[in-house]
Amino acid sequence: MVLVTGGTGLVGSHLLLKLAMQNVPVRAIYRSVEKLEQVKKTFSYYTTNVTALYDKIDWVQGDILDIPSLDDAFQNVTHVYHCAALISFSPSDFNILDRVNREGTANIVNMCIAKNVQKLCYVSTIGTIGRTSTSLAADEETEFNRQFANPYAITKHLAEMEVWRGAQEQIQVVIINPGVILGPGYWENGSGSFFKTAHKNYSYYPPGGSGFVAVADVTAIMVQLMNTDIHGERYIVVASNNTYKEVLEMISRAMNKKAPYKKLQPWQLQIGKYLDLLRHLLTGKPRTITHSTIHGLLHPTTFDSSKIIKTLDYTFEPLENSITFSSRIFMKEHAE
C-alpha cells in the first residue's frame, strides 16, 4: 500500500490521479470533506472516468500533527509520498509553519520508522537550495543560508533534516526540490496567483524570476524515483529558469490578454512592503511583501536540474505547454 499525504493539494491530487491510473493500491490523508471536491475537479481536467478513479483511493481523514490518525493511515503501508505542507511567506506565521512543516514531517518520519516503511519521497522546495553570489546556477550541493530565506524555506529546510534523520534510521529516502509548480485548479494560492494576475490585466510585473516546472513533471519524477533503488539523494526539479515577466507573458498570451509591461522598481517594492505591513496590522492577513521577498526579487538565482535529467534520462515538458493547458481551464472556470 502507498500512502500520500497532502492528497488534496496541487501536487498530491495530480499524484493520486497518476497512481490510480496505474492501478497502484493507494491511500490518502485528507483533513476536510470540502477539499475532496477539488480532487474530483482536478481529475476531471484529464479524464471523464473521474468516479471510478477516485473510488480506487482509500481516503483516511487525519492530520500529520495528529499521531493517532497517522497510526490508522500507516496500516500496511510500504511507501510514502509526503506532499503535505503549509505555504506562507509571512514572518508572523513562522510558528505554525514550523509545526506543520517541521513537526509534521518529523511525525511522518517517526511513523515510517515505527511501521518499517520501505521508502519515503519528500516534496521539498528550491527555497532550501542555497543561493549563489555569482552567475553560476545553484545545484544540490549549494549550501543553504538562512540570512535572506523566508519562513517557509527555513521550515522546509528543517523538515529536510528530519527526513535525513529517517535515512540514518535505515529508511530509504529521496527528496525532490521543485521550482514554482504550475498546474490547474488551485487558483487561490501558490502559483495560481500567476494566472489570476495575468487575467486581471495588470500593467506591472515584478523583477527577478525563478525556476519553474509543470506539476505533471513533478509527479512523474516522484513516481520514477520511488520505483528505482535510488535513495539517500535529493534532486532539483526545474524545467526552466524564467523571469516572472516571461511567465506572465506566456499566461497572458494563452488567455489572449495584454501582458504586463512595467517593471516594479525597488522603491515601489519598499512602499509596497510598508503598505503590506499596514494591511497585516489592520486585518491580520498574512504578509506577502517582506524583506526576504524583496531580496529574492532583486537577487534571483538560477537552478541546475542536470542531476535529475542524467539520473532518470528525463526530458521536461516545455513550460508553455502546461501554461497553455492551465490557462484554458482557468478561462473556462472564470468565464464572464
Image (cartoon, rainbow, N blue to C red):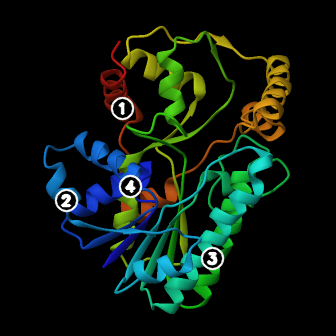
Task: From the image, state whether disc 2 or disc 4 is nearer to you.
Answer: 4
**How far apart in space, not on screen, are marks 1 and 2 (Cα)?**
21 Å
Q: What type is the residue that disc 1 sits on?
A: Ser
Task: From the image, state whether disc 4 or disc 1 is nearer to you.
Answer: 4
In this picture, is 9 found above or below 160? above
Residue at which label 3 appears: 106
In the figure, residue 297 lies in which quadrant?
Answer: top right
Residue at which label 4 appears: 33
The mark nearer the N terminus, 1 or 3, is 3
The mark nearer the N terminus, 2 or 4, is 2
**How far apart in space, not on screen, are marks 4 and 1 (Cα)?**
25 Å
In this picture, is 222 found above or below 126? below
Label 4: state its secondary structure: helix
The residue that appears at 35% across and 65% down in the rendered structure is 223
Q: What type is the residue that disc 3 sits on?
A: Ala
Task: From the image, state whether disc 1 or disc 3 is nearer to you.
Answer: 3
Residue at which label 2 appears: 21
Label 2: state its secondary structure: helix
The residue that appears at 84% across and 20% down in the rendered structure is 271
